[in-house]
Image: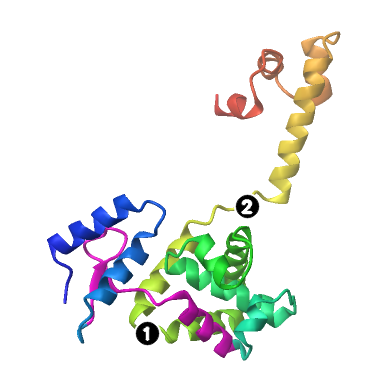
């Protein structure tokens, strides 16, 4: 079945009355009370053209991840930092984020602080792009949720496309040198513009702007 307008309205009302409860948890609770043999379809993230079945619960995601890595859920929740267990935690957090679970709900399932979830997710995304065996493990996990495969893969692609490129070491060094030059130029008030121009190989106009408090970035934009 599909959720009717009145049913969606009632879900929204419940969400408003219970602001601390996740919207998807409210929907899952609603569906449990109205479950039939048919699949229930809900709109994902308010996009009318993207429909998926209700996401699997976190404990199911944990079971699949543990199965792929041949470990127990108690090890996942322990303080053990062996490579394979940390790897499994990273992938669990990554899949949880792909299903739009909050950091708090993901961390509660593995008995960790919610601040670790973003770190694990970012590590998993990095290794997913760099290591073929790591990617194969995540693909194996996703294959267990075949009805969500296309959606999850598109979300991974979006994550990769939204990664901001890191500043190269060369550009970072150049930026640091510019900041150093600017500090010296502002402090060396007894030197003339001509002397500073020869010393730092910059134009007199740049020296004038720096002394006025204009940053290198603004100077370059001019």
Q: Is residue 122 magenta?
A: no
Quadrant of the rendering where the N terminus is positioned: bottom left
Q: Is residue 107 above or below residue 91?
A: above
In which quarter of the view is residue 211 placed? top right
Which of pointers 1 and 2 lies earlier in the amino acid sequence? 1
Counting from the top left corner in percent of width and height, residue 94 is at 53, 70
| Mark 1 or mark 2, whichever is nearer to me | 1
Span of residues in magenta: 39-68
Counting from the top left corner in percent of width and height, residue 171 is at 69, 44
Q: Nearer the viewer, residue 204 or 75?
A: 75
| Helix, strand or loop at mark 1 | helix
Quadrant of the rendering where the C terminus is positioned: top right
- Horizontal side of residue 153 vs 62, given as left or right: left
Residue at the spot x=36%, y=78% of the render?
A: 148
Residue at the spot x=67%, y=19% of the render?
A: 206
Residue at the spot x=62%, y=91% of the render?
A: 70
**Mark 2 residue crowding within 10 angstroms, few (<14) / some (14–19) / many (20+):** few
Q: Which residue is mark 2?
A: 166
**Mark 1 residue crowding within 10 angstroms, few (<14) / some (14–19) / many (20+):** few
Q: Are marks 1 and 2 in contact (CB under 8 Å)?
A: no
Q: Is residue 218 above or below residue 86?
A: above
- On residue 84, the disc is none
Counting from the top left corner in percent of width and height, residue 102 is at 48, 61
Rounded to the nearest whole Å, what is the CA distance between mark 1 and mark 2? 34 Å
| Helix, strand or loop at mark 2 | loop
Q: Nearer the viewer, residue 140 or 198?
A: 140
Q: Which residue is mark 1?
A: 146
Q: Is residue 6 above or below residue 40?
A: above
């Amino acid at each position: 079945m599909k959720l009717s307008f009145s049913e969606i309205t009632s879900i929204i009302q419940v969400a408003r009355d219970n602001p601390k409860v996740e919207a998807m948890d409210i929907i899952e609770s609603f569906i449990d009370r109205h479950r039939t043999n048919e699949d229930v379809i809900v709109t994902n993230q308010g996009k009318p053209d993207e429909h998926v079945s209700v996401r699997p619960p976190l404990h199911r995601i944990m079971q699949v991840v543990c199965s792929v890595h041949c470990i127990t859920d108690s090890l996942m929740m322990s303080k053990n930092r062996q490579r394979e267990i940390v790897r499994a935690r990273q992938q669990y957090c990554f899949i949880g984020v792909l299903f739009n679970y909050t950091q708090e709900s993901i961390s509660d399932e593995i008995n960790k602080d919610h601040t670790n979830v973003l770190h694990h997710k970012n590590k998993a995304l990095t290794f997913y792009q760099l290591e073929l065996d790591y990617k194969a493990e995540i693909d194996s996990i996703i294959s267990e949720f075949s009805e969500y495969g296309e959606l999850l893969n598109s979300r991974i692609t979006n994550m990769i496309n939204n990664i901001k490129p890191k500043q190269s070491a060369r550009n970072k060094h150049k930026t640091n040198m510019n900041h150093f030059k600017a500090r010296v130029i502002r402090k060396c008030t007894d030197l003339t513009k001509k002397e500073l121009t020869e010393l730092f190989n910059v134009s007199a106009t740049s020296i004038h702007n720096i002394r006025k408090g204009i940053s290198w970035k603004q100077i370059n934009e001019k």
